[in-house]
Amino acid sequence: MTKSLLWVSFASSILSVHHGYFIWIVYSPGVLLREYYNPITFQVITHPKFKLLELAIIVSIIPLGGIFASVMAGFLADILGRKGCLVVANITAITSAVLMSGKYIVQDIEFTFFSTLFIGLSAGFILGIVPLYVGEIAPRKYRGVIIFVHQFCLNIGILIAQILAIKEILGNSTGLPALMAMGGILPLIQLFLLPFIPETPRYLMIHKKNEQQARKVLKMLRETDDVEDEITELYQEDLAEGNNKDMTPLKLIRTPNMQLQIITIVVVVAGAQLSGISLAYFSTERIFLMMIDRSNLKYLNSGAIIIMTCSVLLGMYLVDSVGRRPLLLASFAAPLPHILTLEMFSQSSRASAFVISGSVFWSISFITGLSFYYIEIQFGNYSSILFWPFCIATLVYIYKMIPETMMQTFPDIKRVMSIKTARRFRSRESRRKLNLKRSV
């Protein structure tokens, strides 16, 4: 792995730090939603069960923005390029930080909803373009670990937010505007770094048909002049696509030989979201408060995210040595849907695949965000039990249907999935004919 590849990977993943920073601040009950002020009336909270519907609506606005931004990111990634879409994501991220800080001055309910919606737009753009960009600059050998960089940076953002949101630092009524505004620093830094970040060689070669520029970028990223193997691989991927160019999400869904890939992405993304991860965002602090004093809560919160970060580092070490399937089965799910979305689709359909996976991700986030507080009231400490059927169903699907994609080229992965699709079709036809014979 070269220094240039690492530098570009981390520089392009600065937005992921911003995403983790704001998502934790907005979703954490102890930072904004319960401890300091009511986001609807801007009054100090005096009752712990204040206007539950209002709280659920505030939390659910973010996924609505995420759905819209995921769709936009997919189209812009093909029109403006992966790097051009990063520019749009940075501008949206800076705008969201300004609006979140400004809502303490405006103090209007409509402005609160609008600023929260922009957080969702920013998050949708980030999740739609950053994994796509880093995945397309990565060589086959390090594809998994480079995409894990996105999740690692996201966890770092959460940790930074937890530290700054300590009551003695910025987590108080006077420090909250500064806490919001500081979220705009990182995308501003990346905006200045973008002129030094190249467009992905896959986009240049396959979309723009610019072999000379693609070769130049590959030489820079690999720090070698011998990039013929990757150029040949890009040619093979371009030829393998045939007439399946410019695949929109709807056209992709209607393509018969791509339906198994779409089902796989939907199952993995939905399974990860319905695994109980919402419990970590919504209930961790309240669970901790049952065991310890509030003054020590910040240490447990930081300890939990450090453990999560260590888990991501372990996944980074294993993903390109052990493989994707074992990690999926062992519940290292968070970055792996991005990896599968990248690897199971070819260049012309990849952005549309990220639209589909992003829409599923944010749609389920919307449903869980809107309903989880009510579920928690009804089921209390047993809320997480509701997720186990989804976990079992996802585990069975992964075991039976998802092949190993580590160290394989994109055309090879497409060939394996086409074989599985053909077998599935033949099996379905055989069952249909057998049922017809029995009926006769």
Image (spheres, helix red, strand yellow):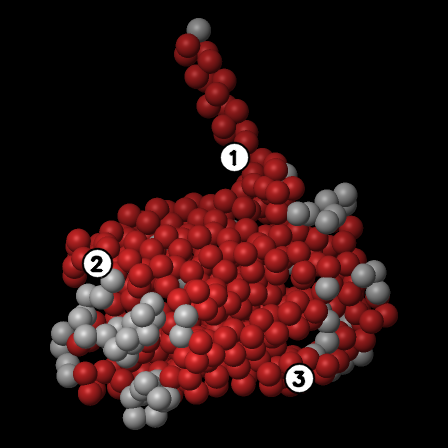
Give the residue type at disc 3.
Leu
SS for dot 2: helix
Dividing the picture into quadrants, the one containing residue 63 is bottom left
The residue that label 3 is drawn on is 193
Residue 175 shown left or right of residue 48 in the figure: right
The answer, for residue 391, to whether it is visible in the render is yes
Q: Nearer the viewer, residue 155 or 335?
A: 155
Residue pictured at 33% horizontal, 67% vertical: 40
Residue marked by disc 2: 376
- Tell me which label, 3 or 2, sits earlier in the chain: 3
Q: Position of residue 70 (x, y in %)?
A: 56, 58
SS for dot 1: helix
Pointer 1 or 2: first along the chain: 2
The residue located at (24%, 55%) in the rendering is 374
Q: CA distance from mark 3 to mark 2?
A: 44 Å
Q: Residues within 10 Å of mark 2 (few under 14, many from 20)?
A: some
Residue topped by disc 1:
424
What separation in Å lies between label 1 and label 2 (alpha carbons)? 40 Å
Residue 327 horizontal/vertical position (percent): 42, 63
Q: Is residue 433 above or below residue 10?
A: above
Q: Position of residue 416 (x, y in %)?
A: 59, 47
The residue sitting at 32% across, 74% down in the picture is: 42
Direction top: furthest residue: 440
Residue at 76%, 45% in the rendered image: 242
Q: Which one is closest to the eye, mark 3 or mark 1?
A: 3
Pointer 3 or 1: first along the chain? 3
Quarter of the image containing the C terminus?
top left
Q: Nearer the viewer, residue 283 or 274?
A: 283
Closer-to-camera residue (346/422): 346
Looking at the picture, which amino acid does disc 2 mark? Glu
Could you say which is closer to the camera, residue 171 or residue 174? 174
